[in-house]
Amino acid sequence: MQECQKVLQGNLPYNLHIFVNSVQFIARVINALKATPETVKVVCSTSGESRQENQNKLGEDFPISQPSDPVKKINFYTSTCFEGCDIYDENGVTFIVSDGRKAHTQLDISTLFTQICGRVRNSRYKTQIILVYSSTKYSSAVTLDDFVKATQRTLAEAKSYAAEINSLSEAARIKTLSKIPYINEQYVRIEDNKLVVDKNLANIDIVNFKICHQIYATYITLTKELRQHDYKIKVQTYDYIHEKLEKQPSARIPFKDLFNEYCRLKSQTESFFVVDSPAQQRAVIERRNPLVKQAYKQLGIEKVKALKYHVGNIRRELVKSLKIGNDYKIVKMIDMRFQKQEPIPRSQAKENLQAIYDSLGLKRTAKATDLAK
């Protein structure tokens, strides 16, 4: 959101042209910015009932514009402008927003993405596109090849079903179709008292599966797809920890990496567009390892660094900070330091216990008999 705020404040030399296929998202950004109609232009569908529905989402203060209307500081466009629409703004920068949780905001790199890149015709920045996205949350259990094969089987079954019905005499076919309340076969529709199989619907399913489950699944797959279509990635920001935890909550990630990422997110007020806000990303880390939040809140960044991110040292330091008696602290630290139900040499036990006394600032000499207390 910072980029929008800077533009509205006149601190940046360009206008924003933001392509995102979600009027609800646009309305949310406008409300968050507390923007005025003089600074924001919104172009979205006005066909049929969608005009009033979209206007209700935006509010009456932000009337739906036409692509040819004068540009403003911030300009939003939904899919109605992704193709065949010419926009003129020498100072226009193109942003494409894709939310991994909303399939209708994800664009095929080879078609719609490329079309959008050419919409602002005369911009001095037309060779640069900024893509703001979050990875999808779909399961990777089904591969693209598996889905293609399943779709082809469904299509073959639809063709067989249609051929069987269409082979009937016209009178029998009309009578049969009139008794069918609805067609329960994918890719099949009734046209002129015959069943027609639409292969394009099957192809659309495959393309959508690839977009949602593969292209936008991870940062790596998205950048690979962009490069395959001759896009050069100049600047990139990428949170591999958040993406990895979303895909595999049990993934092994060092405490140091989790803590440093948590600190980075705590320092952020809000990202450019709220696809996954810093608070949402922090929550993922907190669920994965509650010690991260506890260490940040109770010990602070510098203390954790001084402890060299060592989990055992951090836990002991947290115990020391508890407002309980020293004897209780000793018990807790013994519980953390000593292996359960495993024999330990007396000398080692005394050494560990002495380390606990020293860490608590107690002027005691450890004895093996202390453990029995």
Image (cartoon, rainbow, N blue to C red):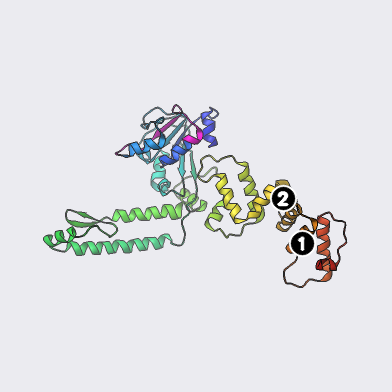
Q: In this rendering, is residue 7 above or below 112?
A: above
Whole-percent x, y for residue 47 in the image: 30, 38
Q: Is residue 37 magenta?
A: yes
The quarter in which the C terminus is drawn is bottom right
Circle on res. 331? 1
**Mark 1 vs mark 2, CA separation in Å:** 23 Å
Q: Position of residue 51 (x, y in %)?
A: 33, 36
Q: Position of residue 121 (x, y in %)?
A: 40, 33
Q: Which mark is residue 193?
A: none
Identify the residue at horizontal 55%, vertical 36% (top origin).
Answer: 2
Q: Quadrant of residue 288?
A: bottom right
Between marks 1 and 2 in the image, the one whose residue lies nearer the viewer: 1
* Magenta span contains residue 183: no
Q: Residues within 10 Å of mark 1 (few under 14, many from 20)?
A: some
Magenta-highlighted residues: 30-48
**Image coordinates for residue 120, horizontal then vertical, percent:** 42, 34
Secondary-structure class at tag 2: helix
Q: Residue furthest bottom?
A: 343
Residue count near mark 2 (Cα–Cα under 10 Å), binned few <14, some 14–19, many ≥20? many
Residue placed most toward the observer, 93 or 179: 179
Residue 121 visible here: no
- Residue at the spot 74% in from the left edge and 60% down from the top edge: 332
Q: Nearer the viewer, residue 38 or 74?
A: 38
Q: Amino acid at mark 1?
A: Val
Residue beneath disc 2: 304
Residue 319 seen in the figure: yes
Of labels 1 and 2, earlier in sequence is: 2
- Which residue is located at x 56 percent, y 55 percent? 245
Please name the amino acid that badge 2 sits on: Val
Question: How many marks are shown on the rendered structure?
Answer: 2
